Amino acid sequence: MSGVDDVWRPTGEDAPAPAPVAEGRAAYGEGVWINQAFSLEVAFRIAFGLLRERPGLVLGAGALIWFAFDLPTFASLPMSVASGVIRASGGAEDTAMGLDLAGNLTTLIVYALVFPVQWILVAGALKALARHVEGEPAPTRLLWTSWREGLIAMVYRVLTVVIVSFVMAVVLLPAAALSAVLVVLEHAGIGAVLFAGAVLVALFAYLYVILPLFMGIPACAIDGAGPLEALQIAWRAGSGARATLFVFGLVFGLLSLAGTCLFCVGQIPVFGLLMAAVAGGWLLYARSPETLGSAPFFERNPVEWL
């Protein structure tokens, strides 16, 4: 990765001083820059620029990631279909329930097996696309050979799930317990209102925590940060940029939903474009304008404030 002198540093009298996350690690910009790097205009300009220049890499990444993330569902589909046919034809409910159980177990087993593969592919896609943007060799084989970055990203993902689950539990469990007490005391209406309010608070807490943590994935995949270091980098990067990241995620989520309606294969270009936008956006955040401004990719696909 680029050295400390190559990393984006805000300028001006009011600019905050960059603070390295760890010894030898480049100091990343403040979260305000994420608002620019992950705006929809810039994201789609980068994504479609990479699609024009490396269509095989972008669509290949999208296809592999789509298949890896949907494989657990595909694996249990025959059993789900058989169970539905048995119920529709008035067959034995015990047989249908057995097929449902077998399908659920199959989904869990396949998910556990492909979970590392999912994150190796995600990390490989981000790494390869970022290298192309920076003008470095970006062979397609990086998609499935970025083992180290992928396993680190996987550990980071598990860590973020634990953190978010803890936050949700802290909010919901006391509310659920108090609601249950109110129901016992014959104040079910008050208990329901209390629990509904707790769910809203938990949803806000979930978004508040998860949105900045999303930025740790490219930190692991592109810049080689470790899981704990990526937490620090991600929280710093996402501060003040939650609204931008929410809109970014919402738009790509809606595109993914639309792709699902096209027999699921419509998700392939969506996943590919998402990887391209994240890789390019991260570089805009974590590198200096001088470094990226001279990159051939941004000469062909200019960003006006770069």
Image: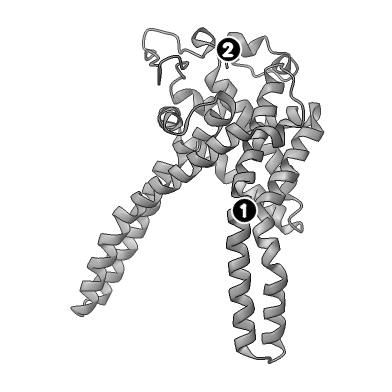
Amino acid type of disc 1? Leu
Report if residue 126 is visible in the image: yes
Please give the count of numbered marks on the rendered protein: 2
Q: Which quadrant, please, contains the N terminus?
A: top right
Image coordinates of residue 180 in percent, x first then y, are: 25, 72
For residue 166, above or below residue 31: below
Residue drawn at x 77%, y 26% is: 139
Is 92 left or right of 35, judged from the image as shown? right
Question: What secondary structure is marked by label 2?
Answer: helix
Q: Residues within 10 Å of mark 1 (few under 14, many from 20)?
A: few
For residue 258, above or below residue 18: below
Nearest to the observer: residue 69 or residue 152: 152
Residue drawn at x 41%, y 15% is: 23
Q: Quadrant of residue 16?
A: top left
Residue drawn at x 46%, y 17% is: 25
Q: Residues within 10 Å of mark 2 (few under 14, many from 20)?
A: some
Q: Quadrant of residue 181?
A: bottom left
Is 9 left or right of 278, judged from the image as shown? left
> What's the image's color scheme?
one colour
Do the residues under discs 2 and 1 have CB atoms within 8 angstroms? no
Is 295 left or right of 159, judged from the image as shown? right
How far apart are the two marked residues, 2 and 1, measured between alpha carbons? 41 Å
| Residue identified by numbered label 1 | 113
Amino acid type of disc 2? Pro
| Residue identified by numbered label 2 | 289
